[in-house]
Image: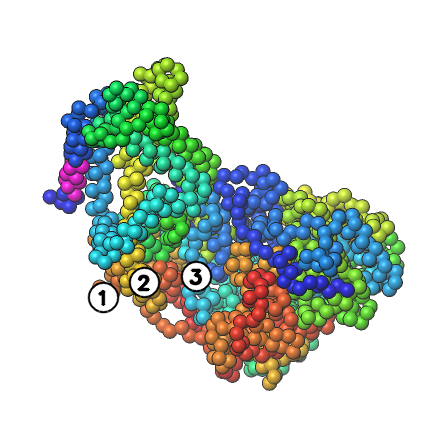
Amino acid sequence: MCRVERAVVRSIGCGFLATGILGGLILVGSRRLSHFDAALVAYTFATLFATFGIAYRYAMWLRRPPTAMYWKRGWQVFLRPGFLLRNLLVLGRRLLVVFAMNRFIWRRHVARGAAHWLIMAGTILAVLITFPLVFGWIHFEAVEGQMDRYVTYVFGFPALSFHVDSLLAGLVFHGLAWASILVILGVMLAMRRRMRDRDAAALQRFGEDFLPLILLFSISATGLMLVVSYEWMRGYAYEFLSILHAVTVIAALLWLPFGKFFHIFQRPAQLGAAFYKDAGARGEQARCARCREPYASLLHIEDLVEVERQLGYRYELGAGADHYQHVCPKCRRTLLAVAQARRFGTPSRGEA
Amino acid sequence: MPVPADRHFFIDPRRCIGCQACVHACSECDTHKGHSMIHLEYVDRAHSPQTVPTICMHCESPTCAEVCPADAIKRTEDGVVQSARKARCIACNNCVLACPFGVPKMNVGFELMMKCDMCYDRTSVGLRPMCATVCPSQALYFGTEAEARALRPRSTPVHEFRFGQQTISTRVRVMLPGADAAGPLDVTAAMHGEEAADPMAAVLPEGDLA
Amino acid sequence: MARVPKGDLEVLGRFGPHLSFPEGDRLDRGVEPDRVVKTHCCFCGQQCGIQLKVKDNRIIGFEPWEDFPFNHGLLCPKGVRRYLQGSHPDRLLRALVRDEAAEGGFREAGYDEAIRLAAQGIARIQQEHGPDAFAVLTGASLTNEKAYLMGKFARVCLRTSNIDYNGRLCMVSAAAGNKKAFGIDRAANPWSDILDAEIVWISGANVAECAPITTDYVWQARERGAKVVVVDPRMTPIARTADLYLPVRPGRDVALFNGILHLMIESGWVDRAFVEQHTTGFDEVAAHVREWTPRRTAEVTGIAEKAIRQAAEWWGTAKRSFLLHARGIEHSSHGVQNVLGAINIVLASGRIGRAGCGYATITGQGNGQGGREHGQKCDQLPGARDLADPKAREHVAKVWGVPPDSFPAPGVDAYEIFRRVEQGGVRGLLSICFNPVVSLPDSDFVRRMLEKLDFYVAIDFFLSETARHADLVLPGSLQEEDEGTVTQVEGRVIRIRRAVDPPGEAREDWRVIQDLAKALGREKGFTFTSPREIFEELRRASAGGIADYAGITWEKIERQHGVFWPCPSEEHAGTPRLFEPGSWNPVARGNGPFYFPDGRARFNVARYAPPTEDPDAEYPLFLTSGRVVSQYLSGTQTRRIGPLVEQYPEPRIEMHPRLAERLGIADGDWATAETRRGSCTLRAQVVRTIRPDTVFIPYHWAGPKSVNRMTISAQDPISKIPEYKACAVRVRKAEGPPSYVREREAQQ
């Protein structure tokens, strides 16, 4: 069996494993489906499918030589004894600055930062509310004898209780509406850029760039319509709207492993890269074989040599003694001109 | 719209006068406005005014994309290797270090690799890239192969390059001497070689060098 | 009186130069411009076509203009970034009046008040000391219309003989040489003739940095097999790839040309038929160059004899050729002799007036060609007419509606005007488009003379280093704020289109001048309502002259992408190539191709003499100066454009490692250069691309970084061009960074 096939089989295995774990958790968390809302079964199956897809794709992705190298090195440098505590602190800061605040996206452009942050915040809020409810991990029961108090059950265990008119209740019951509004605002900002800016016009693709925005908008809009329907229109067209909403959500779930949304799962690799850089900066630096200037960490260069070999590149120089990776980017750029000048026989460094 | 298949970049670093018009113009294109993607460097200023402009060579199988752990670098059907996808790039620097031509730039604040994308907003609608449009020496030229050959009958565009044992094919061409020069151009062979001489030595009488 | 009232730094703080960078709508990729204006770059005589994007009366960017036949969209960094001079924070929006108490020494004033004050000041000086006591200094970046109006204003309104322009620093040696040899002062050929040359000879022209887009013409010729010979004390980027590079010792160009002619005669490479038929004076020149043997030429020029022989052979045996020169040979106390030497080898080759056979000087300033034709020169009337010529006076007087004897006699050159200040003959000054504090040699003298003036009015868009000395500053217009025509390097008259309106209370320069004329009570002849009306009068004034614009209309310029003068009638298409059989020539009238009554070109004996101040034991090195690609002239505009300043922030002293080693200076060290006139402490740039006996400093900076505090005010006796390219200097390692490093930003 060739490598590719073996990789596929293993990744399928990963997919099944992840799906199985989630299925198990649903069974446990909903107390053998006793708190499971049968009306939401389609959502559950779409989620299970998405889980399979994401796990499969993630596993395939991790098999690519550069990704595998980063995966391995990322954990190694993070868990390195003596650095773990510091790494954990740094991790906390990075989670806040990179993931919670999206500082790097705000730096690209304020409108970009705002769009992404709004969409991200709305989506996370919605996911936190809906997924546990759908899986039956959370349900609410009225406190006996106190019709205006609810108890929250998490994984079947009673947790918080609250008054039906409290602020918390308002937040919990209307959380999805707020999430929708955040997402819609973010989508509008993103759409404005995509429809207005010439760089976007040149580069964007429907499937990659518009479809996710359309999906997010559809989910949020139909969700809001549901709220409007039961709050102010006495449930007008509620059935139809709930089916429509389900269709949009399920479509997004099924598409999760394939398109732009997959970046949500890839993105934590940014942390691995950051810790890898930290470790590299602490270690020995590579010096360019041509100009002798330091240009990257030795760790990084030697890993790249290995990755390039695995990818089938033959950047070895001469008798295999040295490797082109040991030449810095600046020298790489000037070498092209020197090589060309030599072919012309014109002086390149001033030889007359 | 794709970039027309018959339109190519032709680079002739011999012509470069180091004026940086390309560097300035690059940051005026809509695809990467405010960010210049070109490198313009002296080869060795102490010895020569020679400079070299570096744009993306748009490899047929781009090393940068292959070493990218995040699948962030894509080559569109028209052979243009695009800048890293913003949603995916994890700013790991692999591409910056592995590109055989030294092209990608890391924008640290953005945590994003950015590189020459052939001014996609222009080339995809039939315009020429900013750098090649303005380049006063036409060290950077953009046109069809037939146009390039007609304008430069004494040199030949080549699009294969050797780095050690590796040959890389690119969409971008480099001019080599002779009407029938053949590639590949052995780039790494230029790593070693002659010591730089004083350019004044050959033309000045002895006394003037004292 | 005209002393900079406050500390330098306070002026800098208020008026700059500050830097502008792209921001806001200039970075927004979603903004659509209201219109895109096809015009030309304002920086340098190439006058590349460019399109400016305009939004809300603001220039927000550019787009190359690929259809314009001269540059086909090519631009240098100055062209790419030129749009950043618009909407600049340093832009003068209101008139300024000297006020010691105000910040930076000026209070703002209403436009009308300022015009009134200006007129009063001018009138007072002229009443008390005569018309010549008030001088006018103008510039070659002005449009033809403005240049014409300035000349008319000086002669008709002010009746002063003292008007001159900053082309005096630029093109005059070439102009004088061309007139002596050809009878006409214009590039003999369009640039397209470069392509067919077998040899391109470039003397004293840093083409890559001063006329960047000409590089492509040179390379196109090379691709067709041309050889390139470059003569320069520095190995410039164009010299690097030249087939032959001749690192001439500063100030010795004419010796080289004489040596080449000597070898041409010796080897039988002279086109005898051409010389016989179309020239005079060859024998005398041949006798003169007999002493210029290769050995002597090598000794004087500092170029190896072998290289001189090679150059002579290539030049002598070519079938088609193009010789280009620029300030490198012209900025000399023997600038005209250098130019005549160059023309002699062109004439001896017989390769002129035909396709692929050409000769030209590369003009430096925006309207370097047109600016020297229409009467802002001290001895000139429109149409390149001679002010001393009674027939010329009569013609122009008729067009202007004044008696011919009302014109003042020819005046003196720009530098001499400052000497007249010292002697007390000149007491007042109006300047426009000229920054002599930075651009004239021995500039401490110039600064002292400005301080000595009784009354000084400047018209400017930014407060230049010179305008800081003014009693009154009137806010004028940037190139893109007005329309008109200019004449670029080839002699092609082109259109400058207005992209935006002058901001605030700034006015188009021609309106400012007309308002002054009105306030002086001599409005007659200064009631134009548009630059186009001025151009129509210029056409009539130039008609019949050598620079004949009579047949040029703005429509024709649009239609033909420019019109080459001479163009005597509307039916005439213009004259891209001079000296062709049958081409328009009002002087020879059929007697021959050149602009003399007999139709023959003149060989002129070109005499060598060393620079006025050659190195000696005390000052053992040559100091030479020039441009960098990212800056333009005195930097009034380009030192305000952030990305251009970043490219080359401050001047450096360029020197050879052998010299540096002897002086104990390493690359990047602070070094002090000192001449008999002044000194500068700058960082050293140690490179093998300059002669070991020469140091180079670019000239675009002011104050403590200004090389012109050290240059010599020696002038060519004929053209009056200053000797910027050679004087004696000594260099030593500085003890530490100069104090300006802490006080000033790089561009200040």
The image shows a total of numbered marks equal to 3
Asked if both marks, 3 and 2, belong to the same chain, the answer given is no
Badge 2 local density, few (<14 within 10 Å), some, or many (20+)? Answer: many
| Residue C515 in sight here | yes
Q: Is residue A16 magenta?
A: yes
What amino acid is at disc 3?
Glu
Q: Can you tell which quarter of the image residue A139 is in?
A: top left
- Identify the element where label 3 is drawn: strand
Residue where numbered disc 2 is placed: A327
Looking at this view, is B146 or A144 the one in front? A144
Residues drawn in magenta:
A7-18
- Subunit of mark 3? B
- Subunit of mark 1? A
- Identify the element where label 2 is drawn: loop
Residue where numbered disc 1 is placed: A321
- Identify the element where label 1 is drawn: loop
What amino acid is at disc 1?
Ala
**Where does the image place residue B38, in percent across and percent down from the top left?**
43, 54
Looking at this view, is C303 or C61 the one in front? C61
Q: Is residue C218 magenta?
A: no
Looking at this view, is C696 or C740 the one in front? C740
Residue where numbered disc 3 is placed: B41
**Where does the image place residue C471, in percent across and percent down from the top left?**
75, 59
Badge 3 local density, few (<14 within 10 Å), some, or many (20+)? Answer: some
Point out the image quarter for the C terminus of chain C: bottom right
